[in-house]
Image: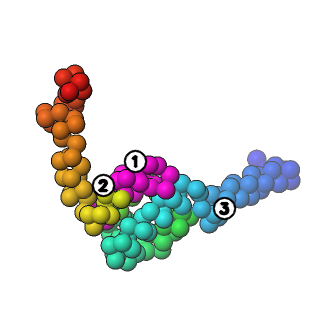
Amino acid sequence: MKRTSRETQAQGSKTRAAARERADNTSGLPEPYAGKLGARMRDLRLERGLSLASLREAGGLTPSQMSSAERGRVRVTMGTVVAVARALDVPPFVLLAFPDEDPLSAVLEEIRQAYGGDMRRVSAVIEERTSGLLGKKRGRGATKRSLHE
């Protein structure tokens, strides 16, 4: 069946609209959350003295893609967050915590920096300092008795 001129024009308009939408999604304008995550990734990478290329294999991204992620120009998957966190030797939540916006994140970041970024030491310190508050039985949480003591 042969298309009419109007059908051809309508199809062309749909194609152009779809192309514009794709361009808008990758226009290089950072998304607010993507920008925060990217800046956090960059800060932690630089803190460890790592290059973009050194995270290539770990994060599954090329240096160019990693650079775009750090600038908030692309959306990052949770798989990439986990892989980059492993490469940076931090738990994934550290990448997703924004100390400037959340008091708890600020405290954790302060402790993390005080211990040179060593999350194992940070975890041990937090566990040591809170073990008496949360009850002696690990993994069971506070008891009625411990809450009233």
Q: Earlier in the sequence, mark 1 or mark 2?
A: 2
Q: Secondary structure at mark 3?
A: helix
Rendering coords of residue 112 (x, y %): 31, 60
Q: Secondary structure at mark 2?
A: loop
Give the label on residue 23, or none.
3
* Mark 2 nearby-residue class (10 Å; few <14, some 14–19, many ≥20): some
Res. 31 visible in picture: yes
Q: Label 3 to label 1, Cα distance in Å?
A: 38 Å
Q: Nearer the viewer, mark 1 or mark 2?
A: 1
Q: Residue at x 26, y 63 (%)?
A: 115
Q: Amino acid at mark 3?
A: Ala
Q: Secondary structure at mark 1?
A: helix
Residue 61 drawn above or below residue 105: below
Check disc 2 and report the residue beneath it: 91
In magenta, the rendered stretch is: 88-109
**Residue sitting at the far top:** 144
Check disc 1 and report the residue beneath it: 104
Rendering coords of residue 98 (x, y %): 46, 55
Q: Residue at x 32, y 73 (%)?
A: 48
